[in-house]
Amino acid sequence: MRIGIVIGSIREGRIGESVGQWVAERARSHEDGADVEWSVLDLKEFNLPLLTNENWADEEDGPAEVHRWRDAVAACDGFVFVSPEYNRNIPGAFKNAYDLLNKPWIDKSLAIVAYGGLGGVRANEAWRVTAAAYNMHVVGSSVNLVRRVDFAGGELALDEHHDRSLDRVLKRLIGLTRKLTA
């Protein structure tokens, strides 16, 4: 079973990379995930074009970056979206990456780790509505990190409470993914 950890920010100076690394470290040592392969999918590394052709993912002559993204997503049975909140919503680059594909998202599990001024709660809720279009099964609880509290001086400053919260979300994601892939 493979679960992708999608880092959804591509901005320079982003903090999403450190959040994604924290999620990956916790996931790889999670007691319920001994049989899980965790794969970090960093949007910044895919260099995806803006969606101008909704069939690119299915066309073999489409952009190689889109095919590489499609194949990476399709190889996963479930996901953790590490999502910032930009302007009270999902980041444009992350939404574009999501919209470039359709079939690889259908009926897969999803957990959300969001961050921002109010803990990324609006991005979290926007992802829940967006994921419904492809019948993604979203874990009920999530991790929400508040920028002014959980990022001291711009650096990730988490404690045991955050680790326990993420562990609970990962436990639910692993269980849900197992049920959906059985």
Image: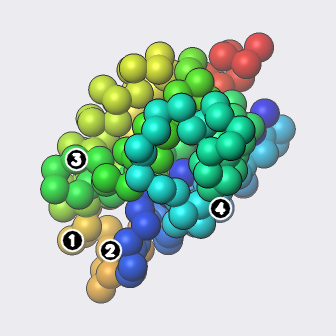
Q: Residue at x 59, y 66 (%)?
A: 45
Proximity of marks 2 and 1: CB atoms separated by less than 8 Å: yes
Q: Mark 1 points at which residue?
A: 148
Q: Is mark 3 on a helix, strand or loop?
A: loop
Q: Name the residue under label 4.
A: 25
Q: Which amino acid does label 4 sit on?
A: Glu
User: Front-most of 102 and 77?
Assistant: 102
Q: What residue type is labelled 1?
A: Arg
Q: Is residue 33 visible?
A: no
- For marks 3 and 4, the one nearer the N-term is 4
- For marks 1 and 3, the one nearer the N-term is 3
- For marks 1 and 4, the one nearer the N-term is 4
Proximity of marks 1 and 4: CB atoms separated by less than 8 Å: no
- For marks 3 and 2, the one nearer the N-term is 3
Proximity of marks 3 and 2: CB atoms separated by less than 8 Å: no
Left or right placement of residue 172 versus residue 93 in this view: right
